[in-house]
Amino acid sequence: MVERILEEVKKRLSTQGAAEVQPPLKKEEVKKEAVVMSVSGLTEFVGTAIGDTVGLVIANVDRGLHEKMGLDKKYRSIGIIGARTGAGPQLMAVDEAVKATNSEVVTVELPRDTKGGAGHGSLIIVAAEDVSDARRAVEVALKELDRTFGDVYGCDAGHLEFQYTARASYCLNKAFGAPLGKAFGIIVGAPAAIGVLMADTALKTASVDVVTYGSPTHGNSYTNEVVLTITGDSGAVRQAIISAREVGLKVMRAMGQNPVSSTKPYI
Amino acid sequence: MVERILEEVKKRLSTQGAAEVQPPLKKEEVKKEAVVMSVSGLTEFVGTAIGDTVGLVIANVDRGLHEKMGLDKKYRSIGIIGARTGAGPQLMAVDEAVKATNSEVVTVELPRDTKGGAGHGSLIIVAAEDVSDARRAVEVALKELDRTFGDVYGCDAGHLEFQYTARASYCLNKAFGAPLGKAFGIIVGAPAAIGVLMADTALKTASVDVVTYGSPTHGNSYTNEVVLTITGDSGAVRQAIISAREVGLKVMRAMGQNPVSSTKPYI
Amino acid sequence: MVERILEEVKKRLSTQGAAEVQPPLKKEEVKKEAVVMSVSGLTEFVGTAIGDTVGLVIANVDRGLHEKMGLDKKYRSIGIIGARTGAGPQLMAVDEAVKATNSEVVTVELPRDTKGGAGHGSLIIVAAEDVSDARRAVEVALKELDRTFGDVYGCDAGHLEFQYTARASYCLNKAFGAPLGKAFGIIVGAPAAIGVLMADTALKTASVDVVTYGSPTHGNSYTNEVVLTITGDSGAVRQAIISAREVGLKVMRAMGQNPVSSTKPYI
C-alpha cells in the first residue's frame, strides 16, 4: 500500500511531459475513418484532428449564404475549421496556416463548449480566391493542431493552456488584436480563479504588454476562464508564459488534480 | 397498495399526453414515479418527455411574478415547456400546440445547455385565459416531441437537427420570424463548421429564402451550432433539408462518428 | 519518507482553513496531495472546497493587472474564490466572509458552467489593504461552503438550490442588489421551467418582495435556470423558500428523478 503511494508520487513528480496522454486512437478506428472517407467521396471534407476539430472547404459559396456571412465579394472559396474543444490551439494553428498560404481569416467565433469542460470551442473561417488555397490552409491548420495542443493541460477540475509564437499573424490579430509580426502569448486558466493568479505571475515575471485580459463575462463566451494575451520581446513573452505555467500547474496539483498535456509540450 | 400502484400506472399511461414519448423507463421506475405522483397530487405537473422536457401549468400566476415576466394582463394561466436538451424539437412541438389550442406563445428563451452537448435547451411559455387551455397546449406539445426529435441525430462529436413544417404558426414566428402559414425548415449542425456546409448545401439545392442564419456568437446562446432557417415552397424547403441532412451525415461519418436518430426520422 | 508524508498530512489537516470542508478524499489521495503541497510551497494557495472551488490570494497585485481588473488603488491584496460548480453557495459564503473580515467584494462574475450541468460557476474577488485580511476572507468563505451547499439538490435532469440569510451583506448586495442587513433568499430551479413554478409558489406563500427574477437570457449567463431572489420579513422569506423547495422537489420526483442534498440541508 505504502509502496504504491510512493510509486505514484515518484512517477508523478518525475514525469510531467506526459506524451502518453494523447487520446489514443486504435489503428482500426483510423482505418475505418479512411474507408468511410473514400466511400463518402465528399469533396468538401478535408480532415479531422484532436479536439473534435473538423476541416471543410466550400469551393463556391452560395450567393445568399455569402451575404449572410458577410464575406468579401472577391472570395468565392472558404475553408472552415471548427472544433468542440479548444480556441487557442485552433487560432494558433490557423495563424500558421495563413502565413503559409494565400488565404485570409474572415471570421472567428468562439462558442461556449469543450463538451462539459470549462472553455471554448471554435469556428474559424478563412477565405481564398481559389479553392486549392482554402483547402491548403485547412490542411496546414489541421496539421498544426497536434503541436498547439501541447501546452493544453486538462484535468477533472479544469484546464490550463499556453500558446506562444515568435511572430503573430493575421488570425491572432483578428481574434485578439495581436500586433503583426511580434511575439505573442496566450495564458488560460480554468476555473477562472487560477487564470487570475497566472496572469499576475506572468506580468510580474517579465516586462511584457497586455493585449487582452478576458474573464467569464468580459471578452469570453461565459467560459469559466481568465485569458491573458501578451506581446513584447520574444524572450520576455516566453519567460512570462513559463512562469505562469509553473504556478498554474502547482495550483492544480494543490487542488489534488493531475493536469497532463494533451499531446506534448512545445513551449 | 400494489393494486393502487398498478391502477395509477394504468391511469397515467392511458390519460397522460406525454406517456408515450417518455424515454423508456424500467418498470420499477414507472411504478415508483406513479406512486410519487399520486402522493404529490401536484396539479401543476403535466408530464415529461424526451430531452428532460418537463411540462407544467400555473392556473393563476402570482401578480408580482406576472409583472416580472412581462405577461399580458388578460392571461391568468400559463403553460411552461422546459428542457435540458433541445430547442428546435420543442419549438416545433409548441407550434403544433398553439395551432390546436386556444393559447398564445408569450416567451421563448434558449439557454446554452444539452447537458455537456453542443446546443440549446429551452424555456417556452404559453398563456391562455383558462387553465384547461394552457394544460391542453402543454399536453399537445409533449405528445409531439417524440416526432420532432426524429431528425435529431446525436453522436459523440456533436449533433445534426432538421425540422420541417408545411405551415408555420405563432411559435416559429415568435422564435425566428417565420412567415405564418408558409412552409418552414430548420437545419442545425454542431460543431458549427458542419452547419456552415449544410447551410451552403441547402441553399444550393433548392430555391428557398433564408429566414435566419445563426452562428455561435450571432443569434445563438454561444452554442457550437450554425442554425439556418428557411421558408418557401413546401417541396423546395423539404428538398433543401434532405440534401443538407445527407451532407451532414456524411461529414459526421467521415469524422468517424455514427450519428443516429433520437427517435425515428420524419422528414 | 512515509513518516514525512504522514507528518505533512497531519500538519495540513490541522493548519489549513479549508481542510474540513473538502469533499471527502480517500486516504491515499490526501497523502498524495499533501506531498505535492509541501513540494510546491505556494503561498498564494489557500485551499479547496466542494464544487471544485479554489481559494487563492495575491499579496501585491501587479500594477498592470490591477488596472485591467479595475481595482481601487487603495487595495494591494486580493482574495480569489473560483468554482466550476455553484454561484449561490459561493456568494453566500463570501457574504459571511466579508461580514467577518476587513475586506470588500470587488467583482462577481458568473460563468456558464457546472461541468455539463444546467447552472453557473463563479469567480468572486475580494480586496483588502492587507494580505492577511484577504487570506482570512478566503478561509472563511471556503469553510462556509459545506453549509451553503446544503440546500443544493442535484439529479440527472437538473438541480434545485435554496439559500437563506437573516442579514444580507455586501456580497449579496453586489451580486443582486440585496438590501443590506435584511433577510434575503435565493430560489433556483433547473431546468428553468421548474424555477418558474417555484417562483410562483414562493410569491404566493408569503408576503415578500422580489429583488431579481433571472431567466436563461435575462440576467443569467445562458444557464438553464430561473433564479428568484427575495427579501422581506425573515419569517416570510424562510417560509417562501420552504414552500418553493417543497414544490420543486415534488416536480423533480414526478419527473422520475431523485434530487439529493449536496451536503446537509440548513434551511
Image (cartoon, coloured by chain):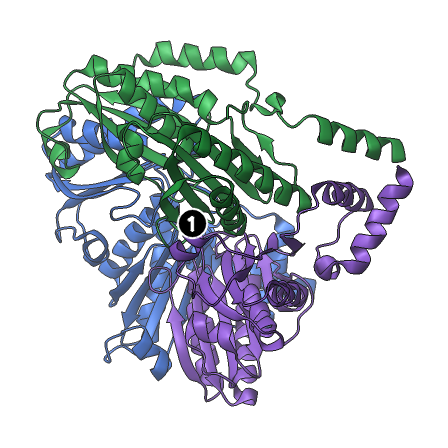
Chain colours: A green, B blue, C purple
Reply above or below: B55 against C185: above
In the displayed structure, does residue B140 sit left or right of residue C199? left
Q: Residues within 10 Å of mark 1 (few under 14, many from 20)?
A: many
The spot of residue C53 in percent (x, y) is 60, 55
The residue lying toward the viewer, choosing from A146 and C134, is C134
Q: Which residue is mark 1?
A: B113
In the displayed structure, does residue C103 sit left or right of residue A137? right
In the image, what residue occupies the spot 44% across and 54% down? C63
Residue B239 visible: no
At numbered mark 1, what does the secondary structure look like: helix, strand or loop? loop
The spot of residue A17 in percent (x, y) is 62, 25
What is the three-letter code of the residue carrying label 1? Asp
Residue farthest to the right, as pictured: C3
> To which chain does the residue with label 1 belong?
B
In the image, what residue occupies the spot 78% across and 59% down? C15
The residue lying toward the viewer, choosing from C193 and B166, is C193
For the N terminus of chain C, which image quadrant?
top right
